[in-house]
Image (cartoon, rainbow, N blue to C red):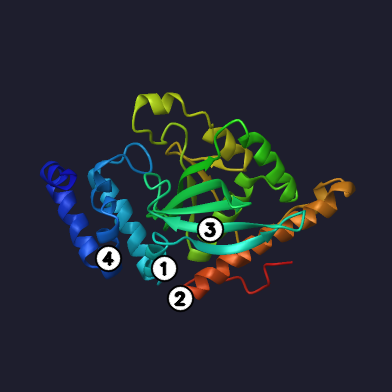
Amino acid sequence: MKLRLGGWLHPRATRRWQDFLARHACLQAQLQRHPVLAHKIYRPYLCTGLGCGARVRVLSEHYGFMHERGLLAWSCAAAERPHCLGQLPLKDGGSAALTLSAIHDGHREGELCLALQLAGQRLYSLSFVIRGGAQGPLLMVGRLQGLAGDEARQLVREATRQLHACRPTSLLITVVRHIAYLLGCAGVQLVSNRHRIALNPWRRWHISSDYDQLWTELGALPGRDGDYRLDCLREPDIDLASLPSKKRAEARRREALLRTACAGVAASLQAAGGTGLQIPSYPLAA
């Protein structure tokens, strides 16, 4: 019903999207298992201001880019089972996991979802997409969301302690900036409060997270379009000289943790058969 109505309201955009899907066997297979892929062009997606035609363009850019990099089948497989991008050693001797999934989580804010899991529980997740930009492809973050509820704040505090004083939000942004570097993107675009999507006024009214403040705290700068920008990241690098001597040991462990996370992502993309990747020539893990 949605597809018929959407095809009637947006015939040209619908044909363009259907033609694009038909050119890729793995997208056709995914369409059979997840019909939402066919009609997501008719609903709010990624950020405000995108009409149906623009949504088709963004989605085609993303999947076309993944195809060029030899990662389309790998990204489609993430819709069936999340990829584990690596295990991160914690302060108490345990480990946290970085995973990548598709379609199911945050699918209105991006095509891929990077998540941090601790003790089997998803602590934070970040949705993103690869879209075209004036200077080259951009990795755009459409959502960064943590656990909700009364216990969430305490869980985040404990996770930060276990991650050697690295906040989960900072860890995910560091990793996604490195993904952008590996894929050869021109930069990272972060959706602003003004441009984030909400399907109804009630949901928008109850959104408590402040993206603008978070992006600013993470070092992002506002762009002319109202969103925020970060550079791609070749390697995590903490300025130890700027820290008091008593904090440098933990900072070194934090830097090693971030390098381990980035190394896991790089290894996963290589193992998936990615081509044209910018893999650093040095060992990322300290």
Q: Earlier in the sequence, mark 2 or mark 1?
A: 1
Other-residue count near label 1 (Cα within 10 Å), few / some / many at <14 / 14–19 / ≥20: some
- Residue bearing the label numbered 2: 273
Question: Which residue shows up at 60% across the image and 64% down it?
Answer: 86
Secondary structure at numbered mark 3? strand
Q: Earlier in the sequence, mark 4 or mark 3?
A: 4
| Amino acid type of the residue that numbered disc 3 sits on in the rendered structure | Thr
Mark 2–mark 1 Cα distance, whole angstroms, equals 9 Å
Q: Marks 1 and 2: in contact by CB < 8 Å?
A: yes
The three-letter amino acid code for the residue at tag 1 is Trp
Residue under circle 3? 99
Percent position of residue 264, x then y = 60, 66
On-image quarter of the N terminus: top left
What amino acid does circle 2 point to? Gly
Q: Position of residue 246 (x, y in %)?
A: 89, 47
Question: For residue 29, which numbered disc appears in the image?
Answer: 4
Which numbered mark, 2 or 4, is in the foreground of this view? 4
